[in-house]
Image (cartoon, coloured by chain):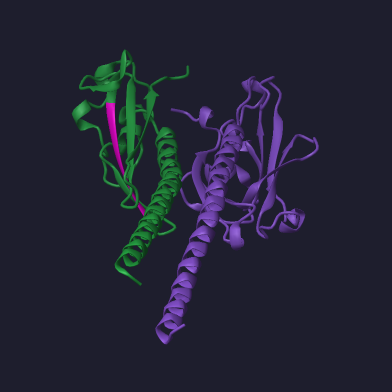
Chain colours: A green, B purple
Amino acid sequence: MNLGQSLFAIGALTILSLSILRMNNNILSTDETVMNSKIGILATSIGTSLIEEASKLAFDENTRTDPVNSLSLLTPALSLGQEVSGVFDDFDDYNNYTQNDTIYSIPFRTVCRVTYIEPSSPDGSTSNRTWHKKLTVKISSDFSRDTLELSTIYSYWYFR
Amino acid sequence: MGYSTILDILASIVMGGILLNTVLQLSDSAAEKTYNYSGELSLQQNLATVAQVIEYDFRKMGYCANWQNFPDPSKAIAAADSSSIKFYTDYDNDGDIDSIRYYLGSTSELTSTPNPRDRLLYRVVNNQTPNEVNLGITQFYLIYFDALGDTVHLPIANPGIISSYEINIRVESVYAYDEKYSSAYWRQIRLVARNLKNR
């Protein structure tokens, strides 16, 4: 084999190697996307479950047994959170709550935040007491690049 | 033809064979991945559809447009088992109470698909003919909790004590390359008669 033939053979092998590497790269990239999607489904189920559990509770610590007709009787914005550690008896007890789950060996970390909101700007938060609270749930996993964020608004009403 | 030429030809044949084998394996791998990715897409769409259908019915558990026809939400669940549930709701919003029952069929009902584990999920409204859903469901598992959050053990004699429940659904691809079935999983905790809870 002369020099020209050798160069052709080396060139052909290089092109083949690069093609294989490119293809493997594409396969791994698609695998990652599929896995992210599956993890996203699981994260969504964790988030909606947590929202569901929070929604069954009373709007505020002070509305658990008796109705409230004045905003000043609600828990101040800076005091939102658990009154007694480990006891969830009202919606804002989930403020700063963190939860760790493992589903099929995939670890998930959930962080919650509860704030008062003004109806005119539900995306923001306010330090004033209002009849509306927003729970924001962020679910992340070491196995996924993205953090999933879900939120719900819970308004106070009393049936007379 | 000299000795070295024969050696060159033999070495070329061996190298060519290795390269051909590599290319064939690559082609096989590409075909498998393409098949599996299509299966994954269908699988996740199927799971989303199943979850959507179940959520739509389950979230209305205990609801009635005319509340006087359904004054006691603790009776929303008529029967509960690990893979079946019957509950009352007003699914068509006409003020009359309807019953909906979900249950999982056996694997022998779906021998037409290559996956040996997939089953039909049945939905029965009142006394109508059961509607089956064939979306590769391999697991439909329900866990029930009382008001304190403790698990209610089966069999459940008094479904009225159920306050919330967990739905577990696993869906697998119906067809797969080399019988390597993909799966996706959904776990959801829901409340019984959420809209009738006192706040």
In this rendering, is residue B166 above or below A81?
below
B8 sits left or right of B183 in the view: left
Q: Is residue B177 magenta?
A: no
Q: Is residue A114 magenta?
A: yes
Choose between B100 and B173: the one closer to the eye.
B173
In this rendering, is residue B63 above or below B47?
above
User: Number of labelled discs?
Assistant: 0
Residue at 56%, 40% (x, y): give it.
Answer: B45
The residue furthest front is B1
Question: Would residue B169 be visible to someone looking at this image?
Answer: no
Percent x, y of residue A156: 38, 21
Quadrant of image for the C terminus of chain B = top left
Percent x, y of residue A146: 32, 42
Q: Magenta part of the protein: which range?
A: A107-115
A154 sits left or right of A117 in the view: right
Residue at 35%, 65% (x, y): give it.
Answer: A5
Q: To which quarter of the image does residue B15 belong?
A: bottom left
B55 sits left or right of A138 in the view: right
Question: Would residue B1 be visible to someone looking at this image?
Answer: yes
B88 sits left or right of A31 in the view: right
